């Protein structure tokens, strides 16, 4: 998590440890009976029903932080709005909104456009929108055959994007991360020219990521790599005169799923399964708008679900994993294309499928069938509103989705996956992992703007 200023919480009444009041035990007590509620001291009103009188109350600073977040999110969600519009949206008084807006304007989070809106009643109000300069987020995605970097502003808009196609498979982690840091430093220089100051960086990585460490990334050949600290050191070395940026690392499929949640076209769908096709196959589950991480942060590794126990050996050490049938390399091999050609070969596969090439169509049909079999189990377990196909699956979805949908219709319990529901869909454009990484930094700012509220943020 990015470092933030600590939020001070009010201590419980009666001392730092909240000394408990004990009921009179001189009479027999039913062990299943709730203890009697203590009487308030003379002159003090009784606590409201349902509220523990020893429960700490929210301090004024905590409330203001929360309200600043409400206002900032209201402007972000609306795109453009007025003080009166914010008041109607969040339920605070106009006087309170005016005070909060002034603080956000002073800190550089909001800007006034000079336009005015006329509401249903009252005088026109000055239009507010998210600032296009100042605080921003940096995202860096490292995958087997490329490094992608982007900077997004507070509205979540891409302002800088760099992609380099590189062979990272089997490379020393320190060397790969240093190379990514050099690309990131170029992106930060471009952001600086636009008066953007990223306040943190997020790494999107393929594999099992927990507490800043890549526990295992078979396709990169990494094991127990301290990715956060190595990248942070490399980035600082590239920018010795600038303050160090806090760095966090996350699984790439998780970040792509969050990008789909924040910027995609899912409408009211808040529970969905995201499948990311790259060299490997990643997955993420969003439940009620929240990412499901699992007990150790490894939830969603659907690419290593076993399709055939006696199938081909996988880099993870198992056999017959989905990745061996529906991963990028497997699809390209089955279609007779050079798997080392990466993105170009995927484009060629799509072209051949469009022109009716039989071998390409068979490769995609088999991959889609295997994908549907694995997805049917996940759908039976979690009952999502939608299943989203991202990564290389997005351009290949016209040929992968039909066989996958047939498997889902045949294998998901009756009523959960009607054939006409169209719940299997391609990811939205520009909702990739690197944008999700940069936007995750911005989400931290939106959650607690006071922790980042300075016009001289690290950049």
Image (cartoon, helix red, strand yellow):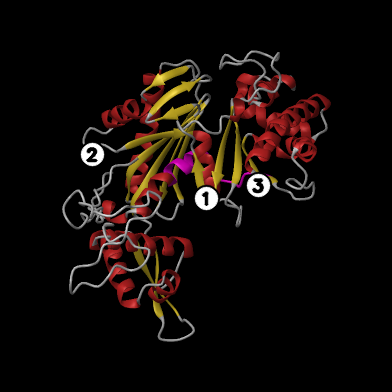
In depth, the one of 28 and 357 nearer the eye is 28
On whether residue 94 falls in the magenta region, the answer is: no
| In this rendering, position of residue 75 left or right of residue 104 | right
Give the quadrant of residue 408. Answer: top right
Sequence-first tag of 2 and 3: 2
Q: Mark 2 = which residue?
A: 243
Residue closest to the far left? 15
Residue closest to the far bottom? 122
On whether residue 429 falls in the magenta region, the answer is: yes
In depth, the one of 231 and 8 nearer the eye is 8
* Callout 1: SS: loop
* Callout 2: SS: loop
Residue at (41% x, 22% y) in the render: 176
Q: Quadrant of the C terminus?
A: top left
Sequence-first tag of 1 and 3: 1
Q: Mark 3 = which residue?
A: 386
Residue 194 in sight in this render? no
In depth, the one of 308 and 389 nearer the eye is 308
Q: Which span of residues is magenta-colored?
A: 425-439
For label 1, the crowd category at 10 Å Cα-Cα, with few meaning under 14, some 14 to 19 and many 20 or more, is some
User: Residue 392 at what x, y percent from top left?
Assistant: 63, 34
Q: Mark 1 = which residue?
A: 289
Residue at (78% x, 48% y) in the render: 418
Q: Do the residues labelled 2 and 1 touch (CB within 8 Å)?
A: no
Spatial CA distance of label 2 from label 3 is 42 Å
Q: Which callout, 2 or 1, points to the residue nearer the camera?
A: 1
User: Residue 118 at what x, y percent from top left?
Assistant: 46, 81
Give the quadrant of residue 334. Answer: top right
User: Residue 31 at what x, y percent from top left?
Assistant: 37, 48
């Amino acid at each position: 998590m990015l470092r933030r200023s600590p939020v001070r919480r009010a201590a419980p009444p009666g001392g730092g440890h909240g000394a408990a009041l004990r009921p009179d035990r001189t009479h027999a007590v039913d062990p299943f009976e709730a203890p009697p509620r203590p009487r308030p001291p003379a002159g003090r009103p009784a606590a409201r029903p349902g509220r523990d009188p020893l429960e700490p109350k929210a301090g004024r600073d905590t409330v203001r932080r929360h309200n600043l977040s409400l206002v900032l999110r209201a402007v972000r969600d609306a795109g453009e709005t007025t003080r009166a519009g914010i008041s109607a949206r969040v339920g605070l008084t106009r006087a309170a909104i005016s005070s909060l807006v002034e603080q956000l304007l002073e800190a550089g989070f909001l800007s006034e456009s000079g336009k005015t809106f006329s509401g249903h009643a009252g005088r026109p109000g000055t239009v507010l929108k998210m600032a296009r300069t100042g605080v921003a987020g940096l995202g860096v995605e490292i995958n087997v055959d490329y490094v992608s970097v982007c900077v997004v502003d507070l509205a979540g808009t891409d302002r800088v994007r760099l992609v380099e196609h590189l062979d990272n498979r089997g490379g020393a982690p320190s060397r790969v991360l240093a190379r990514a840091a050099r690309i990131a430093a170029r992106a930060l220089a471009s952001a600086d020219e636009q008066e953007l100051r990223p306040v943190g960086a997020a790494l999107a990585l393929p594999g099992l990521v927990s507490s800043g460490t890549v526990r295992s990334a078979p396709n990169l050949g990494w094991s127990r790599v301290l990715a956060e600290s190595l990248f942070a050191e490399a980035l600082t070395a590239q920018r010795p005169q600038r303050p160090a940026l806090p760095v966090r690392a996350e699984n790439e499929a998780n970040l792509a799923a969050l990008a789909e949640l924040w910027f995609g076209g899912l409408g009211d769908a808040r529970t969905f399964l995201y499948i990311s096709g790259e060299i490997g196959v990643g997955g993420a589950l969003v439940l009620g708008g929240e990412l499901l991480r699992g007990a150790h942060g490894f939830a969603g590794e659907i690419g290593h679900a076993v399709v055939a126990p006696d199938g081909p050996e996988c880099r993870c050490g198992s056999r017959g994993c989905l990745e061996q049938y529906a991963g990028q390399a497997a699809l390209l091999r089955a279609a007779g294309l050079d798997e080392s050609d990466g993105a170009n070969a995927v484009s060629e596969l799509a072209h051949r499928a469009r022109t009716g090439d039989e071998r390409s169509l068979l490769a995609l049909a088999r991959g889609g069938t295997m994908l549907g079999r694995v997805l049917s189990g996940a759908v039976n377990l979690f009952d999502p509103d939608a299943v989203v196909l991202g990564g290389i699956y997005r351009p290949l979805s016209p040929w992968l989705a039909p066989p996958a949908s047939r498997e889902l219709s045949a294998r998901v319990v009756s009523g959960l996956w009607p054939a006409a529901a169209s719940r299997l869909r391609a990811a939205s454009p520009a909702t990739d992992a690197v944008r999700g990484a940069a936007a995750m930094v911005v989400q931290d700012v939106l959650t607690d703007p006071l922790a980042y509220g300075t016009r001289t943020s690290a950049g």
